[in-house]
Image (tube, grey):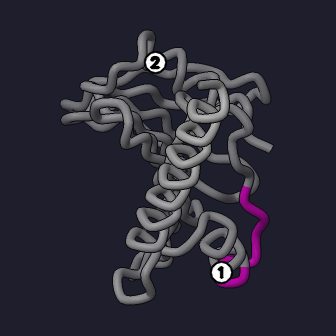
Amino acid sequence: MKKQCLLLFCIILFFSNEVNARHQRVFTTPSNGLVSIHAAVEQFEGIVGKEVALPTKLPFNPTHQFGEIKSDNSLELMYVNDKKLNNLFMIIIKPSKKELSIQPGQIGKWIELKNGAKAIHKGIGEAYSIEFITSGLEYRLLITKDTDIPRKSKALLDAANSLQ
């Protein structure tokens, strides 16, 4: 009986890894512009000539992660957990062209990150965001409002403070 259970466990593990690998290949096909985080960051750094900092702490454990260079030369990094409802964390990075501000009519508040950078925390549309400038790059971290993560604002702030 133990051997049968072990064999069944190994088969399930093999197929779940194969399914995850297949999903990753579907997300990162050359035709849709999505590539691995590493490849997207490397390409972006070559375009803008600046080093990108990435968070060491994410709001959840992603099952898939991929990136894309947009037509305006911004970098979009997406982290998804397809096993939990609506778990999407996104980072948009672009060269900084101006100071950050809260526009009239926008709802947001100024906060300070651990590195001393001033940041804007907003609830926009279907997401919460934190925007800040560091090392000449503007970062926008977003998490969907309907994700099942408790304390979404704290999870965003923790991610922003973990950039390295």
Of label 2 and label 1, which has the lower sequence position?
Answer: 1
Report which residue position mark 1 lands on: 43
Magenta segment boundaries in residue numbering? 46-52
Q: Secondary structure at mark 2?
A: helix
Q: Residue 41: x percent and y percent? A: 66, 69
Figure quadrant of the N terminus: top right
Q: Secondary structure at mark 1?
A: helix
Image quadrant where residue 52 sits: bottom right
Residue lying farthest to the bottom in this orientation: 31
Camera-side residue of 70 and 40? 40
Between marks 2 and 1, how big is the CA–CA gap? 30 Å
Residue plotted at (74% across, 38% down): 56
Question: Circle 1: is it few (<14), some (14-19), or many (20+) Cα within 10 Å?
Answer: some
Tell me the number on the disc at residue 103: none
Image quadrant where residue 164 sits: top right
Any part of residue 92 in sight: no
Q: Residue 152: x percent and y percent? A: 43, 19
Residue plotted at (73% across, 32% down): 162
User: What's under tag 2, amino acid-wise?
Assistant: Ser
